[in-house]
Amino acid sequence: MTPTMYSPDGRIYQVEYAIETVKRGTLAIGIKTQNGVLVAVEEKARALQTSNITQKIFQVDRHIGVAAAGYIPDARIQVDRARLFAQSNKIAYDESVEVETVSKHLADQCHQFTQYSGVRPYGVSLIIAGVDQKGESVYVTDPSGTYVSFAAVAIGAGAEEVNDFLEKAYADNITLEEGAALAIAAVNLKSHNEDGVKHIKMAFISSDTKSLEKVSDEDLQKYSKLALEKFKNNA
Amino acid sequence: MTPTMYSPDGRIYQVEYAIETVKRGTLAIGIKTQNGVLVAVEEKARALQTSNITQKIFQVDRHIGVAAAGYIPDARIQVDRARLFAQSNKIAYDESVEVETVSKHLADQCHQFTQYSGVRPYGVSLIIAGVDQKGESVYVTDPSGTYVSFAAVAIGAGAEEVNDFLEKAYADNITLEEGAALAIAAVNLKSHNEDGVKHIKMAFISSDTKSLEKVSDEDLQKYSKLALEKFKNNA
Amino acid sequence: MTPTMYSPDGRIYQVEYAIETVKRGTLAIGIKTQNGVLVAVEEKARALQTSNITQKIFQVDRHIGVAAAGYIPDARIQVDRARLFAQSNKIAYDESVEVETVSKHLADQCHQFTQYSGVRPYGVSLIIAGVDQKGESVYVTDPSGTYVSFAAVAIGAGAEEVNDFLEKAYADNITLEEGAALAIAAVNLKSHNEDGVKHIKMAFISSDTKSLEKVSDEDLQKYSKLALEKFKNNA
Amino acid sequence: MTPTMYSPDGRIYQVEYAIETVKRGTLAIGIKTQNGVLVAVEEKARALQTSNITQKIFQVDRHIGVAAAGYIPDARIQVDRARLFAQSNKIAYDESVEVETVSKHLADQCHQFTQYSGVRPYGVSLIIAGVDQKGESVYVTDPSGTYVSFAAVAIGAGAEEVNDFLEKAYADNITLEEGAALAIAAVNLKSHNEDGVKHIKMAFISSDTKSLEKVSDEDLQKYSKLALEKFKNNA
Amino acid sequence: MTPTMYSPDGRIYQVEYAIETVKRGTLAIGIKTQNGVLVAVEEKARALQTSNITQKIFQVDRHIGVAAAGYIPDARIQVDRARLFAQSNKIAYDESVEVETVSKHLADQCHQFTQYSGVRPYGVSLIIAGVDQKGESVYVTDPSGTYVSFAAVAIGAGAEEVNDFLEKAYADNITLEEGAALAIAAVNLKSHNEDGVKHIKMAFISSDTKSLEKVSDEDLQKYSKLALEKFKNNA
Amino acid sequence: MTPTMYSPDGRIYQVEYAIETVKRGTLAIGIKTQNGVLVAVEEKARALQTSNITQKIFQVDRHIGVAAAGYIPDARIQVDRARLFAQSNKIAYDESVEVETVSKHLADQCHQFTQYSGVRPYGVSLIIAGVDQKGESVYVTDPSGTYVSFAAVAIGAGAEEVNDFLEKAYADNITLEEGAALAIAAVNLKSHNEDGVKHIKMAFISSDTKSLEKVSDEDLQKYSKLALEKFKNNA
Amino acid sequence: MTPTMYSPDGRIYQVEYAIETVKRGTLAIGIKTQNGVLVAVEEKARALQTSNITQKIFQVDRHIGVAAAGYIPDARIQVDRARLFAQSNKIAYDESVEVETVSKHLADQCHQFTQYSGVRPYGVSLIIAGVDQKGESVYVTDPSGTYVSFAAVAIGAGAEEVNDFLEKAYADNITLEEGAALAIAAVNLKSHNEDGVKHIKMAFISSDTKSLEKVSDEDLQKYSKLALEKFKNNA
């Protein structure tokens, strides 16, 4: 039963199983706002783990960040390839790669591993968020090789419920700060430590700087308060 | 049980299973008219999905569009190859590639994956619609590697019933506008939101411009009214 | 159970299963006459299918036609290779390739896929009919890699019964026109629309022109009448 | 269970199964005589099959003929290679290849397919008969890669009984004509149309001409009478 | 069931089984201190085994040591590659490779063997401890291809319990000597010879020298006493 | 279950099964004497088989002969390679290859096919007998890749009993003639036609000539008488 | 179940089965002494086997010997590669290769066959004994790819019990002669012919000569007497 096999009802089992890997991963969120995009992940570090290093948010290029849910080593490898791809694009065309171009490239990688035997499909979904000449955008890739653009999206464990929440709570005109609050509210929807931020990592790419920046713990605290004010009722 | 295996009664199971994948895909339609061709798909976006981007209609060349049903990442990959093929043809022969040539090329791709082990057959059917020096034409490819030319055709979930409808309602002398109405009527035959167009994407290639153009939501609304007038009784 | 496996009683199952694919295909016929050869197929098009294009009769070279029964995409691929082979021959030897040479080449292709694992045998039988410097000839290839020469032959669903009919009705001295009538009678032997010709495609290669020509619908009608006169009793 | 596998009792199943294929083939016979060698096969053509072409006797070189029993397409491929080998030998050494050299080459081909996985063993036995500078000789190869020299030998269906008959009826000093009669008697031993020759094809290589010649139907009739005179009692 | 296969619930079995190999390995520990890092392993030599050679602590570069738990030959091979990688880095960039760079390289190696068939995943976890221009650091890789940074960490049999102990007993400001005592206490937590050091191997990389040095048996004795004083209660 | 697989008790099944093939082969014998070495085989030809050609004794080089038991086509292929090897050695070192060198080369060939998948182990044992600058020697190779030197040895069906006989009857100081008698007695120990020699083939390499010579049927008769005189009681 | 597969509890079955092959091999021993190292094996030759050739002790280089237990053809192949490796080292560095370097090289070879599919792990353990610039040393490799240094060690059938004996009887300051006696006592511990030496082969590498020398049968007799004196009680 390699990826090259269909079930009698036309499903590619190994791809569907790989999507299960994603569903078992911790939650990741991407939000597009008026003045930038953000990615956020729930990340529970072990007690003595060096906590300032995130395993699940990656920078692909100056203006593009990635959040992952599922089998994280696959995400690291995919991001490594995307970095190389982004640099090659910059050299070839003398301008920063577009977010969609990177997203399509990552999805094509995924697709390739659904067709040939001897490899497994990637077991990870990625949220690719960035700001380029076309503006802000947030894409999602999954093990099947699909890529889709969203205004706000959650992947990983509990994503279905969180997406329902985002649908209700999201508005086109929110700011990055409000987006951060929304992301915190969304993560805490499913988390036991409901109002805290210790288990959350977040990164901004503002439309001005077009540059990925880690959100500090202090700022996370601030946005957490905002989250309680604005989104408590939506949950 | 690789694609290279026959069942005792001479069927290639993996190809037949791949055709099941197509049958589980959402409906896609292609129609040839007096003054152009069109492709239309049913496409239900998730709430926060960026809705102006279609996943299921692709442009291969200026004068050729594709609508897909089944495993959409396969369609994307096939279209990527077809684009390259179309460009290579233009460079080699200094004229636009013919629609049939592209269709045969896509079908040959499909066939290749029915014969060799280590890969699965493509899990997608494509409607290739275009206008070339020979006039308007609409082709369909499927996982078996077949390609066939139609005046009007539906693929995907419910295609059988919709094809019966098209057979009754189609006439050789219809215009693009009437074709659009027919396509809307056909999609809504199987859809719950019977008379709406929000779940429909469509593209025209008019015989004059020989150029693919997205049909706007306003125009879809207009054709929807025409559909109610003309084809309500055929359903 | 790849093609490389024998059953305990010395049969190559995958080849025998591929022959089942041929038996499930629609009928194809080839007839050698005094003044030319012909191929004919039963081909039921779907209602809106562009009916003037046949899926089952192919032209390999000016003087050689092919009719197929079984898995038609395999036939298309085999014919593509045969065309290339015929052109290469013409270039190398500066004369048209012989019908037997093409037939052997096609059979060798088939054989290759019965011996190596990782591929399935071709699931199609071909009738190769042509006129060359040695005169008229009709060959049949099958998935096992066999090629045999016949005066008149049927392959596909019901071939056994139709071959019995041909045996009784065929005479060495028939003309192309009588051959066409015989072919129509033979196809209609097994078909429900007994006397019609809408479901029949036919091509002639006359000994004079040594050039494949499609038989028009009007001519098919004419030969159909002849068929009723001459062969009604043989059935 | 590829050819690379032994059974617990040390048998290579796929080779033994391939030998079953030979046993299911129609009878082929080779006989060495005072003034030449001959090969003969039982070959039942279908009614409209072009009867003057044999499927089971091949010419490898001017002075070497082959008769096959089993999976005939394999024989054709083996003979094609043997022809090339014979021509290469002639070019390299400027004299006709020896019959044993060709036989060993054919057996080596067979052996190769008993050792490596991914292919099936050849499903055919060959009788290689020829006249070279060492005189007349008749060899047999089989799917295991064995080659053995005989004075007279039968392979295929019923070979065991026919070999017993040959053993009793054969004499060292017989002539080609007597050999032909012996071969006819041997074939008809197992055949239902006991005394006819329509189902028999035969070829001579006389010691004088060292050149393969088809035996005509008239001559076959003549030898058939001789067979009835001489060998009726041996059966 | 190759590494390329997912279970229906999205787990890569072979990777999880390889992690079982690690859990069956003897304990290994890595600790980061104020003035250096250390690795320690439990290593029970057989009676006549040359005892001054450790099988489970390796030097990758002057400033980087590795401790392994699981299938030790895999560790040796991984370390060999890491040594080459470290040397190549030094030559390319003219400065010592960073500990994280080596750790990522080792994890990437592990990942590669989780994706392709025809190989098994590595059955070993590594603690990579070193001092570079960024200071002291301790990383852990595992068969899945993950790498994570820790202040103090245990892998192998009983690691869970020992990590709980380290969590309670570890403090950021401990010295190398206190770290050594902590490591001894940690190993002896699960060992039968509770207070001895014969079964322990240890290596220091001090922040001053940035050079790996084996801890002598006398020093181990000294630190063992310190362990009894300081950490007896934590256990 | 390829050759690359061990059973739980550490046996390589395919190698052991291949050794069964040897045990099912007819008997072969090698004997070292004062003035030369000999090989002998039991070889039952079919009635019309050309009897002066042996299938089971081969000449590798002027001074080296081989007798085989088991799957004879494997022996032929191995010998072909050994001949090439012997010639290459002669060219490279300008002296005849040593018997041990050839034996090791043959055993290495055997070994190779016990380690890699996709091939089966050779199903044959060889007795390599020769006279070189080191004197007379007799080696045996088997499917496992072992090679061992013997003074006298039997392989194939009944080898165990025959080796017991050789052990009792063999003496270091026997001559080639006595060795021939011993070999005949040994073969007839297990054969039904107890005292005859028709079923025996033998070849000598005398220490003087260092050249393989077939033993004539007359000489075999002579040695047969000697066998009855000398070894009747040992049996 | 290739070598690339783990069991659910993290064991590599094929490696463990290969270790069973070693346990079924006859005993081999390596001992390090004050003035040299030795290897000894139990080797029961068949009656007519040329007894002065050992199958289980090999010379890798002038100063390095190997004793093997398990699947001996694997040992031969491994030693062949080690010889090449030793010669290459000598050429590259202009000094004799170290014993540890050879041992690691042999273990790396073993490891390689535990990781990739399509091959089986080596089914042999080797004792590598030698004297180099670092002094005397004895290493053991096994199918898992491990290599460990010992003062005295036994492998093969009964090794566990014999190692217990060596542990008790071994002393650091023994001489080569005493080591030989110890080895004989150790072999005879498990052997039926308790005090004999006919079934024992031994080789010395003295610290003076650094050159492997076979121990003569007379010397074995002498050491056997010493064994009875010194080690009878230890058993």
Image (cartoon, coloured by chain):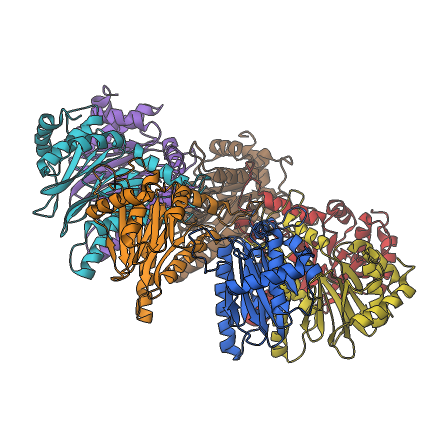
Chain colours: A cyan, B orange, C blue, D yellow, E purple, F red, G brown
Let me know if residue A89 appears in the view: yes
Let me know if residue F223 appears in the view: no
Nearest the viewer among C89 and E161 is: C89
Figure label count:
0
Q: Quadrant of the C terminus of chain C?
A: bottom right
**What's the residue at 45%, 60% (across, down)?**
C53
The percent position of residue D104, horizontal first and vertical second, equals 67, 65
| Extreme residue in the top direction | E233
Asked if G204 appears above or below A17 in the picture, the reply is: below
Nearest the viewer among B156 and G104 is: B156
The percent position of residue F35, horizontal first and vertical second, equals 74, 63
- Residue E186 shown left or right of residue G104 in the figure: left
Give the quadrant of residue F7.
top right
Nearest the viewer among D60 and B225 is: B225
Give the quadrant of residue E224.
top left
Asked if C83 appears above or below B139 in the picture, the reply is: below
Nearest the viewer among D194 and C179 is: C179
- Residue A174 shown left or right of residue B112 in the figure: left
Asked if G12 appears above or below C76 in the picture, the reply is: above
The percent position of residue E4, horizontal first and vertical second, equals 40, 42
The percent position of residue G28, horizontal first and vertical second, equals 54, 41
Give the quadrant of residue D75.
bottom right
